[in-house]
Image: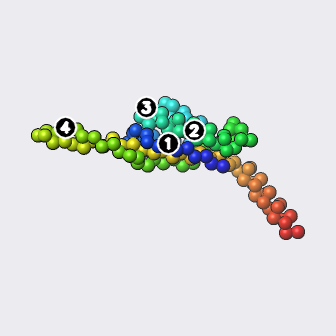
């Protein structure tokens, strides 16, 4: 079962944040946390906090399951543009240039990695239940 975490109005441009997010897409959660902890880029702190929030959301959805027994991974993560604050900067000859201070929204989805033996057990259970219902 997957869990979602959303962070809105992060005061960084979406382009810079996408560079950080691309590093963790598809990674296991432990590896992604390690990458973000030692990344020097601006948005790494925001994404690390968001990833921890997604993990706690997953724990809340799956109360009976221990997080140590399941391998979580970053299923999807994407960055969308947020509001842009518009400011004016003085320019030569009495003019003014517009400065846009961009922001972004980050959506992160965490899911449990299903191992091959687990899939085989699920298929076996489905086959046995189908055989029992047909009789």
Q: Earlier in the sequence, mark 1 or mark 4?
A: 1
- Pointer 3 and pointer 2: residues touching (CB < 8 Å)? no
Q: Secondary structure at mark 4?
A: strand
Q: Left or right of 111: which side holds 22? A: left
In the picture, the disc for residue 53 is 2
- Pointer 4 and pointer 2: residues touching (CB < 8 Å)? no
Q: Earlier in the sequence, mark 3 or mark 2?
A: 3
Q: Left or right of 43: which side holds 115? A: right
Frontmost of labels 3 and 2 is 2
Q: Earlier in the sequence, mark 1 or mark 2?
A: 1
Q: Secondary structure at mark 3?
A: loop
- Pointer 1 and pointer 4: residues touching (CB < 8 Å)? no
- Pointer 3 and pointer 1: residues touching (CB < 8 Å)? no
- Pointer 1 and pointer 2: residues touching (CB < 8 Å)? yes
Label 3 – label 2 distance at C-alpha: 21 Å
* Depth order, front residue of 85/130: 85
Label 3 – label 1 distance at C-alpha: 20 Å
Which residue does the numbered mark 1 point to in the structure image? 7
Q: Residue furthest right?
A: 135
Query: Residue 86's quadrant in the figure?
Result: top left
Q: Secondary structure at mark 1?
A: strand
Frontmost of labels 4 and 2 is 4
Q: Earlier in the sequence, mark 4 or mark 3?
A: 3
Q: Residue at x 33, y 42 (%)?
A: 85
Frontmost of labels 4 and 3 is 4
Q: Residue at x 58, y 46 (%)?
A: 4
Q: Left or right of 67: which side holds 30? A: left
Residue 16: x %, y % from top left? 39, 41
Label 4 – label 2 distance at C-alpha: 42 Å
């Amino acid at each position: 079962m997957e869990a979602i975490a959303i962070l809105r109005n992060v005061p960084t441009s979406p382009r810079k944040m996408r560079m950080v997010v691309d590093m963790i897409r598809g990674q296991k959660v432990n590896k992604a946390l390690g990458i973000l902890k030692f990344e020097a880029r601006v948005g790494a702190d925001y994404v690390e906090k968001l990833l921890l929030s997604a993990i706690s959301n997953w724990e809340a959805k799956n109360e009976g399951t221990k997080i140590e027994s399941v391998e979580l991974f970053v299923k999807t993560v994407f960055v969308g543009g947020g509001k842009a604050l518009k400011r004016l900067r003085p320019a030569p000859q009495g003019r003014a240039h517009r400065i846009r201070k961009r922001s972004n929204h980050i959506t992160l989805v965490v899911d449990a990695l299903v191992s091959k033996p687990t899939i085989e057990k699920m298929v076996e259970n489905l086959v046995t239940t189908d055989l029992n219902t047909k009789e």
